[in-house]
Image: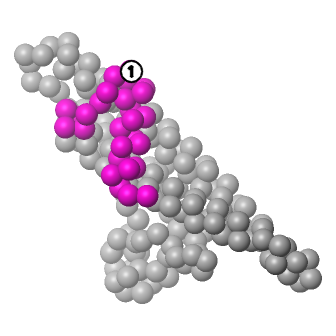
Amino acid sequence: MKLEDARAEVLNRISLACGFEVKEEDLSPGLRKSITSISMTLRQLIVIKQLLLVEQTNYNRFSSRLLRSVTGKKDEELANYIMQVDILQRDLNGKIDLTAKLVCEEIEAGWASPNSPQKTNTSNIFIEPLKCLSCGAPLNIPSFPSRIAKCEHCGTEYAFSEYLERLGASIKS
């Protein structure tokens, strides 16, 4: 998924909530920044979910089921990760709803007094992108099937569970 597609999805959800088409160029810089950070996080979650579902499909193939029946190994971790991503998507949907409310308020305030300067909302939503704890470089989506996020700058590795926890904390803050 491209960032432009995620941005279009966020703007579509905001437009539906407001009841009219919202154009990003009509919004204050703060709300545009909110939409960008939410779009980046939405893209991240959708890509992770797709990769997990591909992994789950591969896991459910006959040969994998046969191997698991022989070894007795189960991968409940995969199902837990999918559930965690679903929860993060639900939390992000809450941020989208809150941003939609702020967008509607900002646009309605502009319509109420078109000749006065439009007030910019000071309570915008911003989701901080994940950064490497060692060097501060942006952290990319984990690779699959290893489920390891590796900093491209310093090489520090992050377990998938830690990556999801940090992403969740970023969404909730």
Report the side of 111 relative to 19 (left or right). left
Per the image, label 1 sits on a secondary structure element best described as: loop
Residue 68 in view in this figure? no
Q: Position of residue 1 (x, y in %)?
A: 43, 58
Residue at the spot x=71%, y=71% of the render? Answer: 58
Residue at the spot x=72%, y=61% of the render? Answer: 79
Q: Local crowd at mark 1 within 10 Å, few (<14), some, or many (≥20)? A: few
Q: Position of residue 53 (x, y in %)?
A: 64, 62
The kind of residue tagged 1 is Gly
Residue receiving disc 1: 19
Residue at the spot x=37%, y=23% of the render? Answer: 18
Q: Position of residue 5 (x, y in %)?
A: 38, 50
Residue at the spot x=35%, y=71% of the render? Answer: 138
Q: Position of residue 123 (x, y in %)?
A: 31, 36
| Vertical arrangement, residue 32 with respect to residue 27, above or below | below
In this view, the residue farthest toward the bottom is 155
Residue 54: name its quadrant: bottom right
| Vertical arrangement, residue 52 with respect to residue 144, above or below | above
Residue 15: say if magenta.
Answer: yes
Report the side of 50 relative to 135 (left or right). right
Instruction: Give, as a single range, the part of the protein colored magenta.
Output: 1-27
Instruction: Name the chief secondary structure element in magenta.
Output: helix
Q: How is the image coloured?
A: one colour
| Vertical arrangement, residue 128 with respect to residue 104, above or below | below
Residue 32: name its quadrant: top left
In this view, the residue farthest toward the top is 112
